[in-house]
Image (cartoon, rainbow, N blue to C red):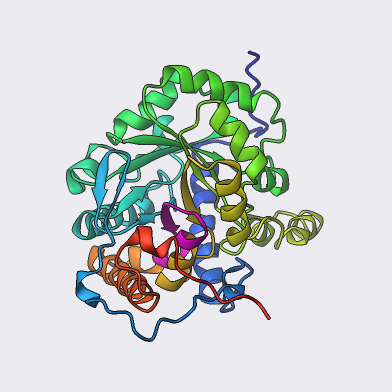
Amino acid sequence: MTIRPPNKPGAGASDIAARKGDHLDIVLAQHAAAPTDAGSGFSAIRFEHVALPELDLDAIDLSTRFLGRRLAAPLLISSMTGGIERAGTINANLAEAAQALGLALAVGSQRIAIEARGAGGLDGTLRRLAPGIPILANIGAVQLVTGFGLAQARRAVDMIEADALILHLNPLQEAVQAGGDRDWRGVLAAIEALAREIGCPLVAKEVGAGLSGAVARRLLDAGVSVIDVAGAGGTSWAAVEAARAPTPRQAAVARAFADWGIPTAAAIRQVRAACPDAVVIGSGGIRNGIDAAKAIRLGADIVGQAAATLAAAEVSAEAVAAHFAGVVDELRIACFCTGSPDLAALREARLVEPR
């Protein structure tokens, strides 16, 4: 396999750290200004209300298993930020909250940490803060053909004692980002080679434009264990890159793709139909526990939320825990009002047919 140099002339540690910092600020601002429904597809889905649930709300069982560990609720604090110093506090707060509530945690890109340009809390501290939950490491899939290999992938896992490794797929973001990695030839073969050697589950995750059923099937056949659809309707990384583009032309090109992608609801349906036995994470525009319930009903095993948590993560672990406790409450009430005593029943809950 030919290893190509990354298409980032002159991109040093300070450049990458500055870009990650810009990403945090822009995502925070965009989430604060986001409309109620940003195109995830969940607003078109309604549960049939059960006026006589015959259930004890407090006895509803939201627990599940993921990556060999028990979760108190089917929720993943999804990938947000990688190894910059500002991220250290964020990652610590997320880890403490995830441990307290029994939720899974996925870290952001570990590229900076792997290249020893700054840990951003991505070290053994994370596992000490969250000893009992699934933790997912994270590198870019395209990095497997621009210099990273098995050694770097194992380092990503080992540095945080992770249970699995996310390979994030972000071709649109790279295409509109100044100096982005635009040559994606050989990425699937590199994923297949890594799957044979890594010794832990691989998770394929889009970053906001969605995974189709057809692509998910190819990834599973290549050895990936978990699919995170990360559909359109959440953070638009094209819009983020438009906000930090160096020229008006590049900003306009990126902005044109701001609403590009497969809506999350459609992506979950597609992936579940194409991959009936896969472990599926539904993420992308999950606003609350009702959206989480809808994602599970459509075929997700667990549900990821990222941007909605970021503001709380900059405050404290308690703020993150309070946010997700609310999401759990909403999910539990959605189960109650659909007559679902557990997640298996929620997956069979009746939907209101569109008029």
Residue at the extreme bottom:
51
- Quadrant the N terminus occupies: top right
- Expressed as whole percent of the image width and height from the top left, the position of residue 128 reads 17, 43
Q: Is residue 177 left or right of residue 208?
A: right
Q: Is residue 336 left or right of residue 292?
A: left
Residue located at (64% from left, 53% from top): 209
- Quadrant the C terminus occupies: bottom right
Residue located at (24% from left, 48% from top): 70
> Of residues 36 and 227, which is closer to you in this image?
227
What stretch of residues is rendered in magenta? Answer: 296-310
For residue 158, what is the image quadrant? top left
Q: Is residue 190 left or right of residue 58?
A: right
| Residue 186: in magenta span | no
Above or below: residue 176 compared with residue 100: above
- Expressed as whole percent of the image width and height from the top left, the position of residue 19 reads 55, 50
| Residue 302: in magenta span | yes
Above or below: residue 60 compared with residue 337: above
Instruction: Report the number of numbered marks.
Output: 0
For residue 141, what is the image quadrant? top right
- Expressed as whole percent of the image width and height from the top left, the position of residue 75 reads 36, 57
Above or below: residue 190 compared with residue 289: above
Residue 252 in sight: yes
> Of residues 277 and 225, which is closer to you in this image?
277
> Of residues 155 and 8, which is closer to you in this image?
155
Residue located at (26% from left, 66% from top): 321
Residue at the extreme top:
1
- Expressed as whole percent of the image width and height from the top left, the position of residue 260 reads 72, 58
For residue 256, what is the image quadrant? bottom right
Residue 147 in sight: no
